[in-house]
């Protein structure tokens, strides 16, 4: 057993301590500080720390993006189905205008259907700006990523 192995075994260093020592770090009371060392050791340490950080960051990014990739189409699918049902129901109910017995009845039904259509338009006018804003923000984020300096 050479001197280094004896020192390591007598001081009960863990694998992490050995790895830290190898790359020029000293562990003292749970505080890590760097000793001056060569560039290649610095690069080794950087990769030693960067790889797990990268994997964790990418997994978090995938989870966030997957959530919205799954959520947005389902919401729009449900919305489109609702609009289709609304259209069918409205058009079939508007057929009742033919069965109006008086001019006042005809006018009342016409106004009620007009109000319902106005509510749909109002809801769409409230929704669409938010959708456009979200679309614009996603495009801005893409542009920001494209402008970010690659190292």
Image (tube, grey):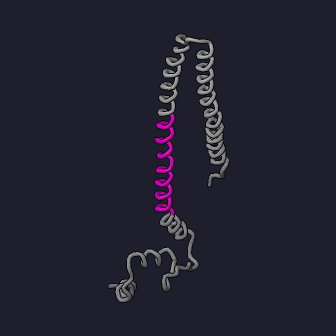
Residue 123: quarter of image = top right
Instruction: Provide the major secondary structure of the magenta segment.
Output: helix
Rendered location of residue 59, percent (x, y): 46, 54
Rendered location of residue 71, percent (x, y): 48, 42
What quarter of the picture does the C terminus occupy? bottom right
* Left or right, residue 14 beside residue 26: left
Q: Residue at x 49, y 36 (%)?
A: 73
What quarter of the picture does the N terminus occupy? bottom left
Rendered location of residue 40, percent (x, y): 54, 68
Q: Is residue 94 above or below residue 45?
A: above
Q: Which residue is drawn at 64% across and 37% down?
A: 126
Residue 118: quarter of image = top right
* Left or right, residue 85 beside residue 122: left
Q: What stretch is highlighted in magenta?
A: 50-76
Q: Is residue 44 above or below residue 103?
A: below
Asked whether residue 74 is drawn in magenta, I would say: yes
């Amino acid at each position: 057993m050479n001197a280094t192995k004896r020192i390591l075994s007598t001081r009960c260093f863990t694998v992490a301590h050995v790895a830290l020592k190898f790359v020029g770090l000293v562990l003292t009371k749970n505080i890590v500080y760097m000793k001056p060392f060569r560039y290649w050791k610095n690069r080794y340490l950087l990769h030693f720390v960067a790889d797990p950080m990268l994997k964790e960051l990418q997994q978090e990014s995938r989870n966030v993006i997957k959530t919205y990739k799954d959520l947005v189409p389902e919401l729009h699918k449900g919305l489109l189905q609702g609009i289709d049902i609304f259209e069918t129901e409205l058009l079939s109910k508007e057929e009742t205008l033919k069965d109006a017995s008086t001019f006042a009845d005809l006018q009342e039904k016409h106004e009620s259907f007009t109000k319902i259509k106005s509510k749909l338009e109002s809801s769409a006018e409230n929704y669409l700006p938010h959708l456009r804003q979200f679309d614009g923000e996603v495009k801005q984020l893409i542009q920001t990523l494209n402008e970010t300096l690659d190292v």
